[in-house]
Amino acid sequence: MTGAKDRMREKKMKHQPRNVPYTSSGRGAGRGQGSQVWVRGHQAGGHGYSQDLPKYITASYFARARAAEVSAMLKAVSRPAGSCHVFNALPKHMRRRAMSHDCKRLPTRLREGALRLAERSQRAPDQQKKPVPKSRSRRARRRHGNLLLEFNRRQQESRWLETHIWHSKRFHMRKSWSFCVPLAPTAKGYRAAYRAMDTHALLQDLSYFCCLEIQGSEEQILRALARLTNKQTGRSLAAVSCVSGARQGIVQLYRSDCFPRGALGPAEFLWRPRAPDAALRQLWIWLHPALKQDVLSELLLVCGCSPAVSEDLHPEADPAGRKRKSDEGDAGPPPKRLLGDGTRPAGAPVRWESPDTHITISDLTLEIVRFRLIGPLAHTVLTDTLRPASEMLSGEDDSLHRQQTHTFQLLRGVCSTAELPAGCVLGLTVDDPRLTLPQKRGKTVPDLQPSTEEDDVRDLRLRGVAAHCSQSSLWDESIRECVTRGRLSDQELNRRRSDLLVPGSRLSSSSAVPVLLVHHAGRVCGEERRHWGSGWDLLLPKGWGMAFWVPLVYRGVRVGGLHMSLKHSQFKGQPHFPHDYPDCPAGVRFQAEQELELREKFKRRPPSKRTNYIKHGCLAPFRCPWQQLTEEWEELVSLSEDTASRDDTPFTVLRSLKELRLLSGWIRRRQRLRVTPDPPLTRLRVTPDPPLTRRGVTPDPPLTPAAASALQQECRRSLLWVRLRLLSKGQPALHAMVCVPTTSDLQLLRTEGQSSGPQEPRHTDPPSDPADPERVLRGVCPPPLPGVVTHCSRTLLGWVTQGDFSLTSGCGEALAFISLTGLTHTLLTQPQDQRGLVLLRNPSSLQYRFAQISLDT
């Protein structure tokens, strides 16, 4: 018997009389006092009991021994032990669930034993009993005050957005970055969401993005932040169009004075338009929540700021964690709904000041609500939902409000959101959108009537919004707090509707809300589907999230979550944070979490249903070893000496526009391939087109071994982010391998244009050693990994970070990182008309597929 069976046997036999001997499967002597011990079965030493018959039997002794055993057996049956209840003695067809707490349902002969067990449980000491919590009825739990207390308590672990309750009823929720954010809708609406982005509008709540406000002298701010950016990566914070406040910009942040290494991640920034009587400037920096702490520490370092005097900015956070004990006698304040970052610990700094530069940094996380509309009719949805305020806020300029209203009304004459300049900003003060909520949910359609102000609309398309129209009262903290406190509740709004003399008529405006409309660009790189995925961001003061969310949903928009944000970036051909930033701290943490998630998912599958990655020649199915990839390519091309190639130089991702444009010219094929049918035979023949020339375009420098070697030395151990498009069928998967085609592979593609590609020979998986503690999973290569570049029959270039069937191009597309050294070495060996051709193979397949590299700049 096992240990559990031994304990069960001893438990059942503890009521046996002392004169009945027994043992526990030979593990010890019995409890009896007799000289003879009866043991069934074989002993542990291999000795069995004797098979010989006794020479004689005394009837009197034999009868007394059997009588004692029979009485002990009856006594043990009538007195169950431990957790065994009396009704276990009944046959199964007579057992009832109610017998466990109602003794009268038992037969009369068993009631006495059941009552005795109940009395014994009541006499147990109080400290051994588990306290039973007092549960309230559902009606009490669903009261408004109790619901608020429960919601506030649940927000202590992960912060909720203002639209959390709406999303939790319709979406799968995920706890990420200390927020509870929507992941994907419970309805299968992936294609419907794509159609919304392509033809109408998709709505997302991006309020979990963190906002840091920097206030001070413009010169001091630019001087401090210049240490975190570099002009080689694109537009900086000092761009003329951005400093004026008329445009929103995107910048790549690095650790102070560490470019090109020490990357942190991307950030969006927006300057407040200059005021004639203001000496200080305000700057908002929008960050992904996984990036906030890394950037905040660097900002405090370069600005020389220290925590200011602690202020209790969230008085409603005090009662959030307390749970109401009873409904009567509660003399405390009524529960309040948490607005903003109400779960911030008491005394946590939210403002930092510098005594030297007089720069102030404030944390505005969840103080501003941010909604994103994606699609060609995003501006139409906004013009149908928002109404310019009839009564302005205190301190606003009447003429400025009229100009902003006129510019906002001009948006009705624009056919598509993509026609507007990228990043333009429009400030506006609007009425409560709940006052114009339609009776039924419908779909907003564009106005096809020709506009009477075609010249103004054309000027708006070319120049965008004027800088002075980008001003908004949303920048003032006092006005934001006043607007948040003055918001009417839904109960008060419904009461006013019921008091109307004419049911259904429009209520008079009682509150004005300052908002900011920020245009975000779509696809700005590449040659196909330019400006796809553009839209508007709507910025609101806290507390007004649901007041604007429901009217937008009533205009027929589709709602998306994190999954659609990832697909939006993939279809635009842009890297998504933190998935496509392996050299940033947030990207490293994301890859570690992704590896753990994929490994646990692999373990949950039965062994017969798992993919044997060793037989498929896949060494990294869960995480990509980027550092090992760059080091091996450096050694393979003999870029440096043996001692220099073994240093600890970390890899980087190439983001310098100058080098990216140079590589893009080398990858782009000089001669486009044209497929024409052969007249005598119905066979496809590939003929090159004549080279194309463009006026005013400087030709790219030629690809030579000297130029490639110079680039490799300058960008040592660098990764290149590229876009791959399959030439035939196939769907790329996560961590698919990007490999270099051989000469025979390129010749096969030239002769057979629709070739499926070569196949990888099956590898051998040696039997696992039970004594090897490193080999945890069967079919997965244990660390340390062997050479990843030359492990398979095709040389490895990199791995795919995102891959799927693209609905925009109608074929399989993937976003990948490849070695810069490996790419330049490959381009030198390929024919001019086949440059940039690679092979793509999924981790669970042996089939290679031909793909074309595109480097959009």
Image: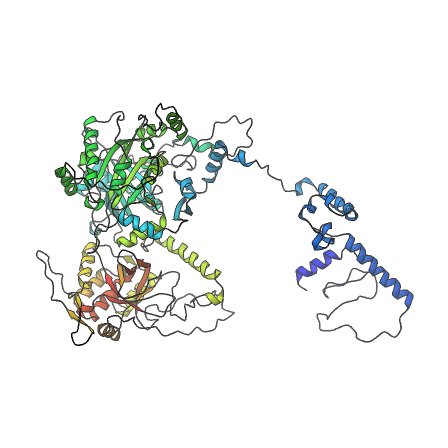
Q: What residue is shown at x 80% (from left), y 56% (from top)?
A: 74
Q: Quadrant of the C terminus?
A: bottom left
47 and 556: which is toward the camera: 556
On the picture, is 549 further left or further right than 123? left
Q: What residue is shown at x 26% (from left), y 62% (from top)?
A: 725
626 and 52: which is toward the camera: 52
On the picture, is 823 further left or further right than 47? left
Residue 148 location (% of width, % of height): 47, 34
Vertical placement of residue 46 versus 698, above or below: below
- The answer to whether one can see residue 19 in this image is no
The quarter of the displayed image where residue 526 is located: bottom left
Q: Which residue reaches farthest front?
A: 502
On the picture, is 20 further left or further right than 264? right
Residue 809 location (% of width, % of height): 26, 58
737 and 71: which is toward the camera: 71
Residue 741 location (% of width, % of height): 27, 71
The quarter of the displayed image where residue 33 is located: bottom right
The quarter of the displayed image where residue 41 is located: bottom right
187 and 520: which is toward the camera: 187
Q: Quadrant of the N terminus?
A: bottom right
- The answer to whether one can see residue 12 in this image is yes
Residue 164 location (% of width, % of height): 41, 41
Vertical placement of residue 768 versus 24, above or below: below
